[in-house]
């Protein structure tokens, strides 16, 4: 698999990683045996970046990854996230970017992951009550101690990225980016990443599964699938967004690939490392095949015509969560 640098401090990963969140929470029933087999298969296919967070569960997703990498820690680039405060008994409290919490959370994550260091440690969301300089300063201390290799941010504004990077080099920004979500192209974030040499890690590169083409009705979701609360999957928004997916499917069919592969190839063409999430080997294999897809100038023009910036209908999250973005 093609390798791509994240930042300028030597962190290199496969052009496509794997998001593990759905193996534990949010997307219906889980199966640990299949999840572990999926992680095994990912490593076989050259996927190196494995993405988790302390809040996925909480804790159980990190524990799953620790189990998967037992005895072969060096096989993967482990990325996890902090900044959403969780008590040791698993109660969610709120945003917390204070140095003392970050240190406590990291020690807990290391135990759950069964390792002595995390390769890429993200601030999951920006705590507006704590100056980013203070938070990143604490993360820099953890780098100096060898407990984390590289610092990442998630869902941060251009201004916050600049302030953070001035304290310590930021290797990567993780943010939603796909044919359905192109806001970073116009709010200064993408330009800032390019200027500072910071890597882009795109989560939800398949539009939370919409762009896979497998979702045709809101009834396709399990009762406990959180997408039932996502504005983009509700009412008229769903129907309008499905029209876009049909156009993406048409272009993909002309190339004899799946719509998901087209969507992933587009994200990777933009220079990002995509981390599509899946909990099944068959979808993983379909996704990773996108790394071999070449998009021509004509392909890109056709995609742009049907999925320009702003084409999606509906907010990214329910109203109560929108305020945590762009900190």
Image (cartoon, grey):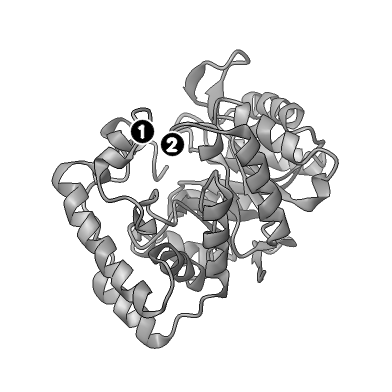
Numbered mark located on residue 27 in the image: 2
- Residue closest to the far right: 71
Q: Upstream in the sequence, badge 1 or badge 2?
A: 2
**Residue 296 locus on image (x, y percent):** 43, 85
Q: Where is residue 82, by image quadrant?
A: top right
Q: Quadrant of residue 222?
A: top left
Query: Which circle, 1 or 2, is nearer the viewer?
Result: 1
Q: Residue at x 50, y 80 (%)?
A: 294
Q: Residues within 10 Å of mark 2 (few under 14, many from 20)?
A: some
Residue 291: x %, y % from top left: 57, 70
- Nearer the observer, 296 or 225: 225
Q: Residue at x 25, y 64 (%)?
A: 246
The answer to whether residue 165 is above or below residue 247 is above
Q: Visible in this render: residue 307?
A: no
Q: Which residue is mark 1?
A: 222
- The answer to whether one can see residue 21 in this image is yes
Q: Which mark is residue 74?
A: none
Q: Is residue 57 left or right of residue 7?
A: left
Residue 161 as seen in the image, left or right of residue 115: left
Residue 144 placement, left or right of 241: right
Q: Residue at position x 55%, y 43% from top? A: 279
Q: Report helix, strand or loop for mark 2.
A: loop
Mark 1 and mark 2 residues within 8 Å of each other at the beta carbon: yes
Asked if 269 appears above or below 49 in the picture, the reply is below
- The percent position of residue 198, horizontal first and vertical second, equals 58, 61
Q: Badge 1, how many Cα within 10 Å: few under 14, some, many 20+?
A: some
Distance from Cα at disc 1 to Cα at disc 2: 8 Å
- Image quadrant in which the C terminus is located: top left
Farthest-out residue, top: 89
When the figure is inspected, residue 213 is found, relative to residue 261, above or below; the finding is above
Which of 215 and 170 lies nearest the eye of the viewer?
A: 215
Residue plotted at (85% across, 40% down): 71
């Amino acid at each position: 698999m093609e390798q791509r640098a994240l930042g300028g401090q030597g962190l290199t990963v496969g052009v496509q990683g794997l998001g593990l969140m759905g193996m534990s929470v949010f997307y219906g029933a889980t199966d640990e045996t299949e999840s572990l087999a999926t992680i095994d298969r990912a490593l076989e296919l050259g996927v190196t970046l494995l993405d988790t967070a302390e809040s996925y569960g909480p804790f159980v997703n990190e524990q799953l990854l620790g189990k998967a990498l037992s005895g072969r820690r060096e096989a993967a680039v482990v990325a996890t996230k902090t900044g959403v405060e969780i008590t040791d008994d698993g109660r969610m409290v709120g945003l917390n970017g204070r140095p003392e919490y970050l240190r406590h959370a990291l020690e807990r994550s290391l135990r759950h992951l069964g390792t002595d260091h995390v390769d890429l440690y993200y601030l999951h969301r920006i705590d507006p009550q704590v100056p980013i300089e203070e938070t990143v300063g604490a993360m820099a201390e953890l780098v100096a101690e060898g407990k984390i290799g590289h610092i990442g941010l998630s869902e941060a504004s251009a201004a916050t990225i600049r302030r953070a990077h001035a304290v310590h080099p930021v290797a990567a920004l993780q943010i939603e980016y796909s044919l359905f979500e192109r806001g970073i192209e116009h709010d200064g974030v993408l330009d800032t990443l390019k200027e500072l040499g910071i890597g882009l890690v795109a989560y939800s590169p398949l539009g939370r599964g919409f762009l896979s083409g497998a979702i045709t009705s809101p009834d396709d979701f399990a009762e406990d699938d959180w997408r039932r609360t996502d504005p983009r999957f509700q009412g008229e928004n769903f129907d309008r967004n499905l029209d876009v997916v049909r156009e993406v499917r048409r272009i993909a069919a002309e190339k004899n690939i799946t719509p998901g592969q087209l969507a992933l190839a587009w994200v990777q063409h933009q220079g990002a490392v995509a981390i599509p999430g899946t909990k099944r080997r068959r979808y993983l294999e379909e996704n990773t095949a996108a790394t071999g897809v070449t998009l021509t100038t004509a392909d890109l023009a056709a995609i742009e015509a049907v999925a320009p910036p702003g084409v999606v209908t509906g907010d990214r999250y329910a109203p109560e969560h929108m305020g945590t973005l762009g900190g």
